[in-house]
Image: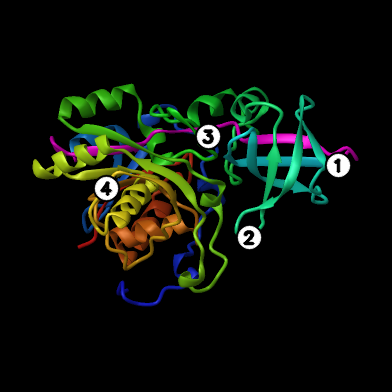
Amino acid sequence: MPQSRTFTVDDFDYALPPELIAQHPARERSAARLLDGRGALPADRVVSELPQLLAPGDLLVVNDTRVIKARLHGEKPTGGVVEALVERVLADHEVLAHLRASKSPRPGSRIRFADAFDAEVLGRAGPDHSLFHLRFPADPLELLQRHGHVPLPPYITHGDDAEDQSRYQTVFAARAGAVAAPTAALHFDAALLAALERRGVARSALTLHVGAGTFQPVRVERLADHHMHSEWFEVGAETVAAIEAARRAGGRIVAVGTTVARALESAARLGAGRLVAARGETDLFITPGFEFRVVDLLLTNFHLPRSTLLMLVSAFSGYDHVRALYRHAVEARYRFFSYGDAMLLGRAA
């Protein structure tokens, strides 16, 4: 299928047996399966083999965002049950959150969370007014850490437990602010990092705080009509310098996850095609036909049907090629989504 065609959301649908949706992580992070999709034919491997698939001088770029315990359970003064998912922490103890309740709370009302603290409803927010603007009585990050729950994706059916608190967090996690994990990086552990270092593969970091919108399907038929959710990112000068040095030495830039790809390509867009240090909001929507400026290889998990992430990987490695890889993954019984297996993709020519 030519990349110049007009795509609709139906082009990114596929059938997935429910039992292939991973409910728990692999026993060991780097023991997950890895579908090597760089060639014409797929190769079935294991994540721990990644050092052999990369070359000395290649540069891994990872996302150092840290998942916050963004899910809260509470009730209104009337006794009505409320579930909140904090999307963004603001200044002055304020947050933006998704609220689920039988009746939306009004501005000026209060919600009691975790039977521990009250939050004031300030009003609605967001471009489509789907978020609620709340004020907490103290530092939201501290309150969430103490009273919140791990914001597991909607397709994981069990409540969060001790395993999720450690495994739904990457070993790179440093800067709190994400409400979903950058899942490709969940496969890295100390042994894999040591093997990559021995191989001569360098590493650098950036930050993109993943929002809840990452799980939202595209609800319009034409991709051009979809407005991407906005996420905060920062690509620092050190990372830009590391990428430039790797390029000069003939190394490849390996994005660990779609969040890294979006952040790097957003920074390059701000630099008119040249990668520059940048920070701020990005609503970059990558679909087939997009010209990648920075990323050479992409390590990524398997993504939801009809999702913007599936559209991004199709843009990166070619629509027909990715469709064939997904068919193979289903037939070979790979595990899908956040706690699932991974794939390694090359950039389409």
- Please rate how many residues cluster around mark 4, counting C-alpha atoms within 10 Å: few if below 14, some from 14 to 19, many from 20: many
Q: Are marks 3 and 2 in contact (CB under 8 Å)?
A: no
Q: Which residue is identified by label 2?
A: 128
Measure the C-alpha gap from mark 3 to mark 2: 34 Å
Q: How far across and how far down the image is residue 345, in percent?
A: 28, 51
Q: Which mark is residue 24?
A: 3
Q: Which mark is residue 80?
A: 1
Residue 317's place in the image compared with 115, above or below, is below
Residue 336: in sight, yes or no? no
As drawn, which residue projects farthest toward the bottom?
5
Secondary structure under tag 1 reads loop
Query: What amino acid is at disc 1?
Result: Gly
Quarter of image, res 51: top left
Residue found 46% across the figure and 58% down from its top:
308
Q: Earlier in the sequence, mark 3 or mark 1?
A: 3
* Circle 4 or circle 3, nearest the eye: 4
Q: Are marks 2 and 4 in contact (CB under 8 Å)?
A: no
Query: What amino acid is at disc 2?
Result: Asp
Measure the C-alpha gap from mark 1 to mark 2: 24 Å
Q: Are marks 1 and 2 in contact (CB under 8 Å)?
A: no
Q: Which mark is residue 276?
A: 4
Measure the C-alpha gap from mark 1 to mark 4: 49 Å
- 181 drawn magenta: no
Viewer-proximal residue among 149 and 106: 106
